[in-house]
Amino acid sequence: MTENSEPSPALRAVQLPEELVAALAERVHGTSFESVDAFIAFILARLLDQPGTSGFSEEEERSLRERLRSLGYID
């Protein structure tokens, strides 16, 4: 490692439905993103940086929880 380079951040695996990854791969094709992983990291970072966003509405959160439960991600 050189003096000017920063250490790589720790990475964590996330499981996503295959059809979602396939759709993202189509969207990433032909862009400057190196991979679907890089695209997802970029989108999530942008969402976190948006000022004034307080998260999901109660209805959105309820819907999201139901979807995650139906996919077996949460009990």
Image (cartoon, rainbow, N blue to C red):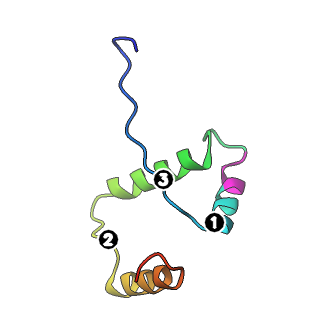
Q: CA distance from mark 2 to mark 3?
A: 23 Å
Q: CA distance from mark 1 to mark 3?
A: 16 Å
Between marks 2 and 1 in the image, the one whose residue lies nearer the viewer: 1
Which residue is painted at 55% across and 48% down in the image? 37
- Mark 1 = which residue? 20
Between marks 2 and 3 in the image, the one whose residue lies nearer the viewer: 3
In the image, residue 29 above or below residue 48: above
Q: Secondary structure at mark 3?
A: loop
In the image, residue 4 above or below residue 64: above
Decide which of tag 2 and tag 1 comes sooner along the chain: 1
Magenta: main secondary structure: helix
Where residue 58 appears, x then y in whole percent? Answer: 32, 85
Labelled pair 2, 1 in contact (Cβ < 8 Å): no
Residue 13, labelled with which disc? 3
Where residue 11 appears, x then y in whole percent? Answer: 42, 44
Where residue 35 appears, x then y in whole percent? Answer: 62, 44
Give the residues drawn in magenta, as a range: 25-29
Between marks 1 and 3 in the image, the one whose residue lies nearer the viewer: 3
